[in-house]
Amino acid sequence: MDQKQIDKGHVRRLVIYPDSRLRRTAQVVDLARLQDKKFQELIVDMAKTMLIKDGIGLAAPQVGRNWRLIVVNTDEGVWPMINPIITKLSSSTTIEEEGCLSLPNTFGQVRRAKSLQCHYINELGKECNLTAKGTLARVIQHEVDHLNGILFIDYLK
């Protein structure tokens, strides 16, 4: 997704914890929805919202949409990921601090896999496979958790 597209987007209102919408399991996106202008606008708006709010990832439930859609900020730009499925997690883990746009001013140390493999559909409808490590792997795990109604605070002791 290029910056010109994102610049045309609108900032969406964030759903803030303890709103119950953050605890729902998101619905699989019917790929016919990719042809819907409103759905494409949602993707752009999510990217803009994430960037404006200084996030590195955002899930559709965080803007009040119960769909399996996330956007992640990578070195190569913003990647929309539709119906992401983590297919493999590394056995090696790391503990790092996490925060969340839906839990302002809340941070905690969370253990996550260092790397993963993921299958998803991009905004053009193309099936993609990704091997991610480091911060990108952590962000994908965090955002996919949102799609399953899980928040990072659930991992805190």
Image (tube, rainbow, N blue to C red):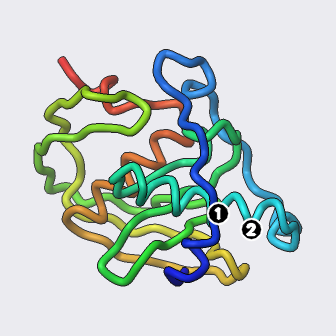
The x, y position of residue 116, in whole percent, is 33, 64
* Nearest the eye: 120 or 58: 58
In the drawing, does residue 53 fall left or right of residue 49?
Answer: left
Judged from the image, the secondary structure of the residue bearing numbered disc 2 is helix
Which of the labelled discs sits on residue 43, or is there none?
A: 1
Amino acid found under the numbered disc labelled 2: Gln
Q: Which residue is mark 2?
A: 40
Give the Cα separation between the discs numbered 1 and 2: 5 Å
- Residue shown at 44% from the left, 48% from the top: 143
* Position of the C terminus by quadrant: top left
Please tell me how crowded label 2 is: few (under 14), some (14-19), or many (20+) other residues with Cα within 10 Å. some
The x, y position of residue 77, in whole percent, is 41, 78
Asked if the residue at tag 2 contacts the one at tag 1, i.e. Cβ–Cβ closer than 8 Å, the answer is yes
In the drawing, does residue 116 fall left or right of residue 95?
Answer: right
* Nearest the eye: 49 or 18: 49
In the drawing, does residue 19 fall left or right of residue 56?
Answer: right
* Position of the N terminus by quadrant: bottom right
In the drawing, does residue 85 fall left or right of residue 73?
Answer: right
The x, y position of residue 15, in whole percent, is 55, 30
The x, y position of residue 101, in whole percent, is 39, 39
- Residue shown at 64% from the left, 63% from the top: 43
- Residue shown at 62% from the left, 25% from the top: 21
User: Does residue 122 sit above or below 47 in this rendering?
Assistant: below
User: Does residue 127 sit above or below 44 in this rendering?
Assistant: below
- Residue shown at 41% from the left, 60% from the top: 51
Which of the labelled discs sits on residue 104, or is there none?
A: none
User: Does residue 38 sit above or below 67 in this rendering?
Assistant: below
Amino acid found under the numbered disc labelled 1: Ile
Judged from the image, the secondary structure of the residue bearing numbered disc 1 is helix
* Nearest the eye: 113 or 56: 56
Question: Which of the 4 quarters of the picture holds residue 72?
Answer: bottom left
Please tell me how crowded label 1 is: few (under 14), some (14-19), or many (20+) other residues with Cα within 10 Å. many
